[in-house]
Image (tube, rainbow, N blue to C red):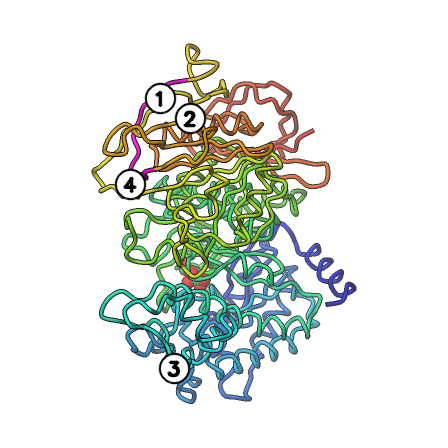
């Protein structure tokens, strides 16, 4: 794309009605008198942005060359007239029945060879030539129709790619997989060697012998499985790129998104994000448990990280309950607002709901919406529409207008956490040494510390630059990419702190164990080698003792303990390793104190160049991990934005020379914060905060302080 068009696209991104507020709107389910009422209610609720047409393929196209845009023309005009911009879908997520009747290749097939039928939604083979062709035609027809429409603000390609069909195993995919493999390995000999096909008589003598990793009597080849995960993520990405290229050609100035699903294993989102103008995602935390706050925050931070810290859109959240859990708890009064602020505080430039008006028919009729059942225009609508849920939606909409100035603001982070999809896939091949530990659990263990201490983090892939970070953590990095090793070495030598955990750098990119043993090429950076792994049963623990744990952060220990060194005892769970330091100057910070690894290193530190690397050979209990991380952080100049009581989240966003501090009291009690060391003005209440003020937070209070 030339720089003029790039500039136009950037201009259009800036012109979006940020902060966006609205949701999925499905007017095709309603009569036109309801549309008019919707316009009034949307304006009242501060809605300025809606997603249109996501599941409308069958409504728009009834045959190969037969399109009907009449209803969409009307609603696009109506929305524009009411000052509401449109995130227009390409409508390719759900294929109409007539397509399946005509084209067999559109059906996806599962690993057992069974066809996955239509009659629900989002059922298609990503490599189907007919699906790709028809989806491209539809995207082009919609773009041609609306490319100059003033309501068009953004493209919404497809919807939640891979949501229901994570992978397809049909013959078309088999063919495409062979081609993908030929590009990756160039010769069959190479492939055989990377996949280790001398094992179990799996050697391939002809490319045609290779099939997708379908159902087998016992364990499948892990390298084959890993490559198929890569191939599927790429195949689905190709579906997106096919539509994206058409849209880019027809409307180069309109930004393009597709909505992700946060913690979602099938797609390598770091790779995807490169071809997306603005990241958007759908968040459905379980409101019945406070435990959903952390994973939800993690996903927001991950989404913000995908484009190096750029703002994202929260494309969907439920105004109250969903319909797909076993018991669907509502968001209690105030909860929607707290979740919404959690998103904004972590980088969202917009809050959108699924959906605007609750469906009367179909599988989602019990999913909440901004306008509840019973608010039909034929009933005394304008009274019924103002439900508890709607009132809260409207309150948030009003507040969004007060926060306009923060749009585009980013969150600087000193801490990077490696969140690498290929490493995740490889680490979770089943069975593995300890099936009780998942990749995400390990990420969460470390993330939890930063979340609860109000320290911003950014997630990175192994491909990312480590520049700008002071501390990089790589939990459970089982599969190490060749290009990552020199990057870590450079990072540490130049003064960075690197920490990695057990079960890291065991395997190369095709899931072959490094011949030199664990942790492969990281041995010289970490200064150790691992002789043996000891996975622990759920009720087994290993004792730990730390003689020299340096706790230089005075905030987290009692008066008798500060300053200096502490002896701490505790336990590790799930895993330990028999570790040998390779050099005399490797410091053993913590030791195992039970089992046959007793007396062996559990946590080590090794100084190289201007920096150091840490290795943690077990999963320490929270108190120990906290003490360890506090020590590392404070010695690297990494401190909490603010010390807060449990349940109060603090984040920061900055743009140009301005910064906004978010303080969210997620508890239903008053909370006090002593000596805030910030001065500024709360954009919500208008109150001023002066330096060193104590702060009283009311239950579920939110403050957005524009700092002086
Ligand atoms: C999302 C989807 C929406 C709606 C919502 C319900 O996954 O994109 O269309 O189904 O879930 O929670």
* Alpha carbon separation for disc pair 1 and 4: 20 Å
* Ligand 1 falls in quadrant: bottom left
> Visible in this render: residue 391?
no
Residue 27 is a magenta residue = no
- Nearest the viewer among 26 and 509 is 509
- Are the two marked residues, 3 and 4, in contact with CB atoms closer than 8 angstroms? no
Q: Earlier in the sequence, mark 4 or mark 2?
A: 4
Mark in the foreground, 1 or 2: 1
- Nearest the viewer among 254 and 538 is 538
User: According to the image, label 4 marks what residue?
Assistant: 574
The residue carrying pointer 3 sits among few (fewer than 14), some (14 to 19) or many (20 or more) residues within 10 Å by Cα, namely: some
Magenta-colored segment: predominant secondary structure: strand
Magenta residues?
A: 566-578
- Nearest the viewer among 448 and 494 is 494
* Alpha carbon separation for disc pair 4 and 2: 20 Å
Q: Which mark is residue 171?
A: 3
Residue 287 in which image quadrant: top left
User: According to the image, label 2 marks what residue?
Assistant: 627
Mark in the foreground, 3 or 4: 4
- Nearest the viewer among 669 and 189 is 189
Where is 478 relative to 602, above or below?
A: below
* Alpha carbon separation for disc pair 2 and 3: 54 Å
- Where is residue 602 shown, x and y percent of the image? 36, 32
- Location of the N terminus by quadrant is bottom right
Q: Is mark 1 within 8 Å of ligand 1?
A: no
Q: Earlier in the sequence, mark 1 or mark 2?
A: 1
Which secondary structure, mark 3?
helix
Q: Which mark is residue 568?
A: 1
């Amino acid at each position: 794309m030339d720089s003029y068009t790039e500039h136009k696209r950037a201009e259009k991104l800036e012109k979006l009605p940020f902060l966006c507020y609205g949701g999925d709107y499905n007017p095709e389910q309603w009569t036109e008198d309801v549309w008019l009422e919707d316009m009034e209610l949307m304006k009242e609720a501060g809605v300025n942005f809606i997603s249109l047409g996501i599941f409308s393929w069958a409504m728009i196209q009834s045959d190969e060359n037969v399109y009907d845009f009449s209803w969409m023309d009307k609603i696009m005009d109506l929305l524009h007239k009411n000052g509401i911009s449109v995130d227009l879908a390409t409508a390719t997520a759900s294929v109409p029945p007539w397509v399946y009747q005509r084209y067999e290749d559109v059906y996806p097939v599962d690993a057992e060879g069974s066809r996955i039928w239509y009659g629900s939604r989002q059922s298609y083979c990503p490599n189907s030539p007919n699906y790709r062709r028809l989806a491209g035609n539809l995207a082009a027809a919609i773009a041609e129709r609306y490319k100059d429409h003033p309501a068009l603000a953004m493209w919404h390609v497809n919807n939640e790619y891979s949501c229901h069909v994570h992978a397809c195993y049909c013959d078309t995919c088999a063919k495409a997989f062979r081609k993908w493999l030929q590009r990756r390995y160039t010769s069959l000999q190479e492939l055989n060697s990377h996949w280790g096909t001398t094992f179990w008589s799996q050697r391939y003598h002809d490319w045609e012998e290779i099939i997708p990793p379908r159902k087998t009597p016992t364990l499948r080849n892990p390298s084959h499985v890993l490559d198929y995960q890569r191939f599927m993520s790429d195949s689905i990405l190709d579906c997106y790129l096919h539509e994206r290229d058409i849209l880019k050609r027809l409307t180069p100035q309109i930004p393009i998104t597709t909505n992700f699903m946060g913690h979602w294993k099938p797609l390598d989102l770091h790779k995807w994000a490169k071809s997306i103008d603005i990241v958007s995602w759908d968040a459905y935390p379980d409101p019945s448990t406070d435990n959903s706050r952390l994973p939800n925050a993690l996903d927001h931070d991950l989404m913000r990280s995908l484009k190096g810290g750029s703002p994202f859109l929260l494309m969907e959240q439920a105004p109250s309950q969903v319909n797909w859990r076993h018991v669907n708890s509502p968001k209690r009064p105030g909860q929607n607002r707290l979740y919404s602020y959690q998103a904004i505080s972590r980088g969202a430039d917009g809050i959108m709901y699924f959906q605007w008006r609750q469906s009367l028919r179909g599988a989602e009729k019990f999913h909440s919406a901004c306008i509840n059942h019973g608010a039909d225009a034929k009933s005394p609508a304008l009274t019924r529409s103002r439900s508890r849920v709607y009132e809260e939606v409207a309150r948030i909409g009003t507040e969004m207008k007060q926060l306009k100035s923060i749009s585009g603001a980013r969150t600087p982070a000193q801490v990077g956490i490696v969140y690498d999809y290929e490493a995740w896939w490889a680490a979770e091949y089943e069975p593995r040494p300890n099936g009780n530990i998942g990749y995400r659990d390990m990420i969460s263990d470390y993330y939890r510390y930063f979340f609860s201490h109000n320290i911003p983090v950014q997630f990175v892939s192994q491909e990312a630059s480590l520049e700008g970070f002071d501390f990089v953590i790589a939990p459970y990095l089982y599969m190490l990419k060749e290009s990552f090793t020199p990057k870590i070495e450079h990072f540490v030598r130049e003064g960075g702190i690197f920490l990695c955990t057990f079960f890291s750098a065991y395997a190369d990119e095709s899931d072959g164990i490094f011949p030199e043993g664990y942790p492969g090429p990281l041995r010289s950076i970490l200064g150790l080698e691992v002789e043996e792994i000891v996975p622990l049963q759920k009720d087994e623990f290993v004792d730990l003792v730390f003689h020299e744990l340096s706790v230089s952060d005075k905030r987290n220990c009692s008066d008798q303990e500060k300053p200096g060194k502490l002896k701490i005892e505790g336990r590790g769970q799930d895993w330990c390793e028999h570790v040998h330091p390779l050099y005399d100057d490797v410091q053993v910070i913590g030791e195992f104190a039970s089992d046959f690894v007793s007396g062996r290193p559990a946590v080590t530190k090794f100084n190289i160049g201007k920096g150091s690397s840490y290795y943690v050979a077990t999963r320490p209990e929270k108190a120990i991990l906290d003490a360890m991380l506090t020590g590392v952080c404070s010695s690297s100049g990494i401190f909490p934005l603010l010390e807060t009581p449990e349940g109060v989240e603090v984040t920061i966003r900055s743009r140009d020379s301005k910064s906004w501090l978010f303080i969210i009291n997620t508890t239903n009690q008053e909370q006090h914060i002593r000596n805030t060391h910030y001065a500024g003005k709360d954009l919500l209440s208008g109150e001023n905060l002066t330096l060193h003020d104590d702060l009283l937070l009311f239950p579920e209070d939110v403050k957005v302080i524009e700092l002086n």
